[in-house]
Image (tube, grey):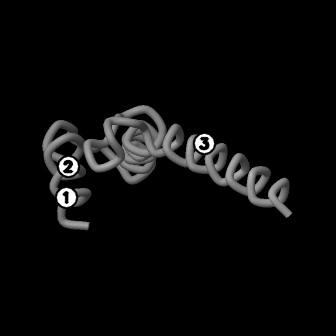
Amino acid sequence: NESFNGKFRDECLSMEWFRNRLEARVIIEDWRRHYNEIRPHSSLNYQTPHEFVGNLTNELTTEARISSSQW
């Protein structure tokens, strides 16, 4: 949480000067999408969160197939 807040402050809030609430919402949402979908995270082995979830889902599906075929 502290890491996210620091990144949000450093990469978004300190780089922008919002003229109104709508502009702030749009810019913050763009940053959030970039953070969650495009930006690699070191804690996820430099994958994006989207890639991490996809890979985890594939691994779980493979494990389930292997497990069910052993019975």
**Is residue 26 found left or right of 45 in the rendered image?**
right
* Closer to us: 25 or 19: 25
Q: Quadrant of the N terminus?
A: bottom left
Q: Nearer the viewer, mark 2 or mark 1?
A: 1
Q: Between marks 1 and 3, how big is the CA–CA gap? A: 23 Å
Three-letter residue code for mark 3? Gly
Q: Between marks 2 and 1, how big is the CA–CA gap? A: 6 Å
Asked if disc 2 and disc 3 are in contact, CB closer than 8 Å, the reply is no
Three-letter residue code for mark 2? Lys
Q: Residue at x 83, y 59 (%)?
A: 68
Three-letter residue code for mark 1? Ser
Q: Nearer the viewer, mark 2 or mark 3?
A: 3
**Can you give x and y, in whole percent of width and height, for residue 56 in the image?**
57, 49
- Circle 2 is placed at which residue position? 7
The earlier-in-sequence mark between 1 and 3 is 1
- Circle 3 is placed at which residue position? 54
Asked if disc 2 and disc 1 are in contact, CB closer than 8 Å, the reply is yes
**Is residue 50 found left or right of 48 in the rendered image?**
right
**Is residue 21 found left or right of 51 in the rendered image?**
left
Q: Residue furthest bottom?
A: 1
Q: Residue at x 86, y 64 (%)?
A: 71
The earlier-in-sequence mark between 2 and 3 is 2
Q: Residue at x 20, y 49 (%)?
A: 7
Q: Residue 3: which numbered mark, if any?
A: 1
